[in-house]
Amino acid sequence: MNGFKTVLLLAAMTALFMGLGYTLGGSGGAVIALIAAAAMNLFTFWNADKIVLKMHKAREVDGRTAPEFVGIVQQLASRAGLPMPKVYIVDSPHPNAFATGRNPENAAVAATTGLLDILSRDEIAGVMAHELAHVKNRDTLIMTMTATIAGAISFLANFGLFFRGGGDNRGNMLAMIAAVIIAPFAAMIVQMAISRTREYSADRGAAEISRNPRALASALAKLAQGAARIPNPVSLRNPAAASLYIVPSGTGRDNLFSTHPDTGNRIAALHAIADEMGLASPPPVTDATLPPARASVPRSRRPRSALDPLGRDD
C-alpha cells in the first residue's frame, strides 16, 4: 500500500508539472514538462543522496573521526536489520536531522552540530532511530524526489511570472495566476501529504528500533524549540526541502501549511507508545539531576563538540 501511495503522489506531482507546462506553453509546453519531470525523477532516483548532502554541505564521518555518533548509528542499524548507512555531520547551529538515499543499501543519515550540541546520547539515538525508520520504510527516496519536483514547480512558476508579465489579455492573466499561485500551492499540498503521514510511522518505527520512545519525545521538544529560534539557511533558500527534516522550522503546529504533524501531538503519541510497551515514566527532572552546564564552544572547535556531544573528553 505504501508503494501504491508513492506512485500516486509522484503521478500527482508530475501531472501538476505538466499542467503548469501546458498553461505556459500549450501542448508543447506540457510535453516538455513531462520530459523534464521524467528526467528529474530518473536523475533524482540515482542521485538523491548526493543532491541533499551537497545542498547541506555535509561532511562524511566514520568511527575514527566521530566514534560516539557513528557508534550510535551502527548499533541502531544493526538492531533494525539495516545495512550500515553513511553518516554525515552538517556544520550548522540549526538543530535538525535527515535521511536520504534511494534504498537501504545506498542510504545516508545526517545530523547538524546544533542537534548534537543540545541532545543527550539517548535523545540522539532516538532521533537517528527515526531517520533509520524512514530508511527502512523507504521514505527517503520519495521525500527527496517530491522535494525536487516541488522546487522545480516553484522555479517554473517564477519563470512563468517573468515570461507572462508583459501580457495584457485575459488569457495571459489567467495563465499567470495559475502559474504563480495554483500550481505551487497544489504542489505544496501534495508534498505535505507525503511528509506528514510518514512522520508518525517513522516515530513508531523509531520507538521499536531504539526501544526508548520517551527519549525521542524529549528530543522532539528540544529540537522544535531550537528550530523555531534558529533559522535553517537551506530551507530558507529552498522551501521545498522543509519536508526532509525531523522537525520543521517555525511553530510546528498542525495546519494546512505545515510540512509536519504538530510536534505536541507527536510527543503525546510517543508517550502513548511507551505506555503500550510497558515502559515506566521517567522521574521528574530537578536541578539536582541536571548535568552541569557546558562552557560555550568557540566556532573553530565546533567539530569536536559535535563528535563528542556528551563532552566525555572534556
Image (spheres, rainbow, N blue to C red):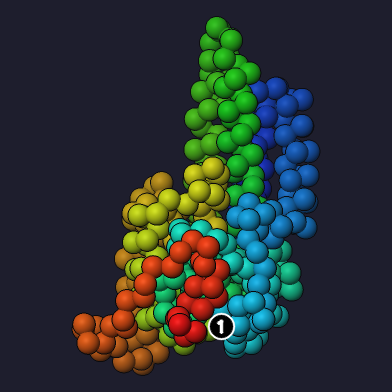
Quarter assignment of residue 184: top right
Rendered-image quadrant of the N terminus: bottom right
Compared to residue 186, the image places residue 234 above or below, namely below
Identify the residue under disc 1: 68
Quick one: label 1, few (<14), some, or many (20+) residues within 10 Å? some
Compared to residue 299, the image places residue 277 above or below, namely below
Rendered-image quadrant of the C terminus: bottom left
Q: Secondary structure at mark 1?
A: helix
Name the one closer to the observer, 79 or 28.
Answer: 79
Name the one closer to the observer, 21 or 67.
Answer: 67
Quarter assignment of residue 117: bottom left
Residue 73 located left or right of residue 253: right
The residue at the point 49 percent across, 38 percent down is 185
Whether residue 203 is visible to the viewer of this picture, yes or no, is: yes
Indicate the position of residue 204 as horizontal and vertical percent values: 47, 77
The residue at the point 63 percent across, 52 percent down is 55
The residue at the point 58 percent across, 9 percent down is 167
Compared to residue 134, the image places residue 173 above or below, namely above
Indicate the position of residue 309 as horizontal and vertical percent values: 47, 77
Indicate the position of residue 131 as horizontal and vertical percent values: 55, 71
Name the one closer to the observer, 75 or 255.
Answer: 75
Quarter assignment of residue 111: bottom right
Residue 38 located left or right of residue 213: right
Amino acid type shown at disc 1: Glu
Compared to residue 140, the image places residue 314 above or below, namely below
Name the one closer to the observer, 42 or 174.
Answer: 42
Whether residue 199 is visible to the viewer of this picture, yes or no, is: no
The residue at the point 74 percent across, 46 percent down is 40
